[in-house]
Image: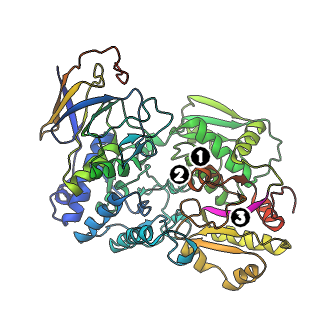
C-alpha cells in the first residue's frame, strides 16, 4: 500500500513501525540515552523507539521535546522516521536541528495513519517539493503480537 | 496555503546576511510550515529560554551559531541558567556538569544576548509596549507579556526563540494575530464577600484553577479584586502556566485587553462559563502543601518568578518587624539587575538578623542550591510549590509571604497574623 504524504522534514528511510495509541511528549516521556518510553501514564511505557518508525496521531507537551528528540537523534536512540496524522512544530524543530548539526536524518511526514500497525514494514520517501510517500507492508497478523495496536 | 516569504526572508535564507542567520531561517521556515503560518512578521525583541542544559545538543546548537559568527539582530534577553555566576559557591554541582552549563550561558552572550539570566525580563530590562510583536520563551514571561502588558508572543521554546532573535522574524500565527487573543472561557468568582481582599494566595489559587481547567484556551476572569500590584498578576500567570499551557489570560477591569467583559470576548459571547467558589480556592491551595502546619522547615524559597524591587522592599520591611528566633535560610531568587538596584545597607541590616540569601541567574527549583532538605520548604510561589517536589525532591508548604517569614522565624510552619 502506498499513501501520499506531506514532508515536514526530508529523508528516505525504511523500518518497522511502532504505532502509539496516544500522543507522547518526548520531554518527560522519552529517555534520550536509551530511546525508551518512560512516561508511566503512557500505555506503551517501556517500549523503545530506537530505530523504529514512530506512528502517532500528533505531538504533545512541552517545547523541550525539541531538545529531547534532537539529543536522541544525536545518540542514535531516536526513531528512524516519524509519521503523524497532524503536523507538529516541536518535533519538526528537533529533527531539523539534528539534521543541520549532525547531518543525521529523521524524516517527519504527515498522512492518514489508520491501518498502520506496530510490526508493519514502512518506507518513507520524501521529495524536494515537500511531497512524500509512505509505503506500508503489513506484518502477518499474529494473535500474540502484544504491542500491535490496530487503528 | 503555502508559506509566503518576503524578499528579505529569502535573502536571509540564501545566506546574504551570513551563514548563522541562514541556518536559523531554515529552522524557522520549517517551524512556520508546521504551524500552518502563511507568512512571517517582524519582531522587536526576544527572550531566550535556552540556558538550561538539556544535553550536548543544547550546547552544540549555540556553539555552531557562535562558530558561524552569528549575532542576534533584535534586543534579546536570557532566561535563567543552571548556575549563579555572581555567587558560584551557592550551586553545588560537579565540575563536569558546571563547565558545559557555564559555557552554554557564555555562548549565548557571545551571540549578543543580554546576560540578564532572569525569568522576569519585564521587570527591569526590555519591557515591551502594548501591541508590540515579540518572541519570548519561558512560560511565566510569555503569559505576563501577553496578559499584563498586552505585547504579543506565542509560547516559543527550544531553538525557535533563538532562531527568531537571529532573524528578527516570527511566524504570523496564534497570539501574534488579534483574532486569536479573544477570550474563550469565562471564569466567574462567585460566593465571595464583597470586601474580598487581594491576597497573594487568592491570585495564585485563581491561576492554578484556570491553568488546570483551561488547557491552552484563553481564560477571562471576572470578579477578582483590583490587585495590589502587578506582582500578584505575575504570580497568577506563573501558576496558570505551570498547571496548564496558558499563554494569555484576561482579567475584566484589570488587564489591558479587557476593559470590559465585552472587550475580553471581542464583542462575542463565551463558549463556556466556569464558576470559582471559595471552596475551589481553598482546595487549590491545600493541594500545594504536602506537610501539615507545625512541621519543621529547613528553608524558605521566595522569588519564583524572580523577585521584583517592589517585592524586595516589602520583604525587607516585613523582616524588620519580626524578631528572629531560628536561623532558617530565606532564599530569594531575583535578577542580577534587580539585586544591583537594591540599597546595600538596607539589605545588609536585615542580613545581620536573618539569613537572607539572594540567588541570581538561576532558580532554587532548577538546580542544587538548598543545602539542608531534612525538613520541608515553605514558599509563597505557586509555581515553586508545583515543580520543586519532582525537580529537587522536597516536601513543600505554600503560604502567604507573611506566613513564610513568620515560619522562618519559628523554624516550623505557622500561619496567621504576625
Mark before the other along the chain sequence, 2 or 3: 2
Residue at screen point 30% across, 62% down: B60
Pick the quarter of the image with the C terminus of chain B.
bottom right
Measure the C-alpha gap from mark 1 to mark 2: 9 Å
> Which residue is the extreme one toward the bottom?
B345
Q: Are marks 2 and 3 in contact (CB under 8 Å)?
A: no
Which element carries disc 1, helix, strand or loop? Answer: helix
Q: Locate residue B392: give its quadrant.
A: bottom right
Q: For mark 3, does the 10 Å Cα neighbourhood hold few (<14), some (14 to 19), or many (20 or more) residues?
A: many
Residue that carries the numbered disc 3 in the rendered image: B299
Count the marks: how many? 3
Residue B215: x and y in percent read 53, 37
Q: Is residue A101 visible?
A: yes
Q: Is residue B252 visible?
A: no
Name the chain under label 2.
Answer: B
Position of B253 compared to B296: left or right? left
Which element carries disc 3, helix, strand or loop? Answer: strand
Residue A28: x and y in percent read 46, 45
Coloring basis for residues: rainbow
What range of the chain is rendered magenta?
Answer: B296-304
Which mark is nearer the camera, 1 or 2?
Answer: 1
Q: Which numbered disc covers residue B240?
A: 1
Which element carries disc 2, helix, strand or loop? Answer: helix
Q: For mark 2, does the 10 Å Cα neighbourhood hold few (<14), some (14 to 19), or many (20 or more) residues?
A: many
Whether marks 2 and 3 lie on the same chain:
yes
Mark before the other along the chain sequence, 1 or 2: 2
Q: Nearer the viewer, residue B279 or B176?
A: B279
Measure the C-alpha gap from mark 2 to mark 3: 28 Å
Residue that carries the numbered disc 2 in the rendered image: B143
Position of A20 compared to B127: left or right? left
Name the chain under label 3.
Answer: B
Name the chain under label 1.
Answer: B
Amino acid at each position: 500500500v502506498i499513501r501520499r504524504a506531506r514532508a515536514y522534514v526530508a529523508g528516505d528511510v525504511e523500518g518497522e513501525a511502532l504505532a502509539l495509541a496516544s500522543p507522547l511528549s518526548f520531554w518527560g516521556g522519552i529517555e534520550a540515552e536509551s530511546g525508551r518510553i518512560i512516561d508511566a501514564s503512557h500505555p506503551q511505557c517501556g517500549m523503545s523507539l530506537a530505530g523504529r518508525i514512530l506512528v502517532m496521531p500528533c505531538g504533545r507537551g512541552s517545547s523541550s521535546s525539541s531538545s529531547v528528540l534532537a539529543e536522541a537523534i544525536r545518540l542514535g536512540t531516536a526513531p528512524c522516521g516519524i509519521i503523524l496524522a497532524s503536523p507538529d512544530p516541536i518535533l519538526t524543530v528537533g529533527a531539523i536541528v539534528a539534521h543541520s548539526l549532525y547531518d543525521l536524518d529523521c524524516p517527519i511526514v504527515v498522512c492518514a495513519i489508520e491501518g498502520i500497525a506496530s510490526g508493519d514494514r514502512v518506507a518513507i520517501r520524501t521529495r524536494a517539493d515537500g511531497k512524500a510517500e509512505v509505503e506500508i507492508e503489513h506484518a502477518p497478523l499474529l494473535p500474540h503480537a502484544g504491542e500491535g495496536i490496530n487503528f | 496555503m503555502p508559506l509566503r516569504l518576503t524578499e528579505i526572508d529569502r535573502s536571509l535564507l540564501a545566506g546574504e546576511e551570513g551563514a548563522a542567520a541562514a541556518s536559523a531561517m531554515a529552522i524557522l521556515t520549517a517551524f512556520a510550515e508546521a504551524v500552518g503560518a502563511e507568512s512571517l512578521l517582524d519582531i522587536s525583541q526576544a527572550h531566550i529560554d535556552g540556558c538550561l542544559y538539556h544535553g550536548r545538543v543544547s550546547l552544540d546548537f549555540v556553539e555552531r551559531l557562535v562558530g558561524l559568527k552569528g549575532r542576534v539582530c533584535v534586543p534579546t534577553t536570557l532566561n535563567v541558567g543552571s548556575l549563579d555566576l555572581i555567587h558560584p559557591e551557592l550551586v553545588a554541582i560537579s565540575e563536569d556538569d558546571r563547565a558545559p552549563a557555564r559555557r552554554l550561558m557564555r555562548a549565548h552572550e557571545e551571540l549578543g544576548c543580554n546576560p540578564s539570566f532572569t525569568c522576569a525580563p519585564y521587570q527591569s530590562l526590555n519591557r515591551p509596549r502594548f501591541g508590540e510583536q515579540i518572541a519570548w520563551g519561558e512560560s511565566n514571561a510569555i503569559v505576563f507579556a501577553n496578559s499584563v502588558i498586552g505585547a504579543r508572543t506565542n509560547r516559543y521554546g527550544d531553538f525557535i526563540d533563538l532562531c527568531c532573535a537571529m532573524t528578527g522574524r516570527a511566524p504570523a500565527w496564534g497570539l501574534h494575530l488579534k483574532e486569536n487573543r479573544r477570550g474563550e472561557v469565562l471564569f466567574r468568582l462567585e460566593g465571595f464577600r464583597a470586601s474580598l481582599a487581594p491576597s497573594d494566595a487568592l491570585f495564585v489559587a485563581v491561576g492554578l484553577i484556570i491553568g488546570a481547567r483551561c488547557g491552552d484556551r484563553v481564560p477571562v476572569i471576572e470578579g477578582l479584586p483590583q490587585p495590589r500590584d502587578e506582582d500578584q498578576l505575575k504570580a497568577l500567570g506563573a501558576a496558570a502556566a505551570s498547571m496548564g499551557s496558558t499563554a494569555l489570560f484576561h482579567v475584566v477591569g484589570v488587564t489591558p485587553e479587557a476593559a470590559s467583559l465585552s472587550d475580553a470576548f471581542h464583542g462575542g459571547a463565551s463558549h463556556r462559563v466556569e464558576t470559582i467558589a471559595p471552596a475551589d480556592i481553598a482546595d487549590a491551595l491545600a493541594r500545594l502543601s504536602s506537610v501539615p502546619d507545625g512541621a519543621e522547615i529547613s528553608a524558605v524559597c521566595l522569588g519564583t518568578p524572580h523577585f521584583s524591587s517592589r517585592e524586595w522592599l516589602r520583604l525587607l520591611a516585613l523582616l524588620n518587624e519580626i524578631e528572629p528566633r531560628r536561623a532558617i535560610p530565606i532564599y530569594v531568587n531575583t535578577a542580577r539587575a534587580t539585586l544591583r538596584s537594591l540599597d546595600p545597607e538596607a539589605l545588609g541590616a536585615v542580613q545581620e538578623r536573618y539569613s537572607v540569601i539572594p540567588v541570581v541567574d538561576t532558580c532554587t527549583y532548577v538546580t542544587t542550591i538548598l543545602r539542608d532538605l531534612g525538613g520541608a520548604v515553605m514558599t509563597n510561589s505557586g509555581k515553586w510549590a508545583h515543580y520543586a517536589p519532582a525537580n529537587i525532591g522536597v516536601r513543600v508548604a505554600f503560604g502567604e509571604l507573611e506566613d513564610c517569614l513568620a515560619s522562618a522565624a519559628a523554624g516550623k510552619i505557622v500561619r496567621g497574623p504576625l
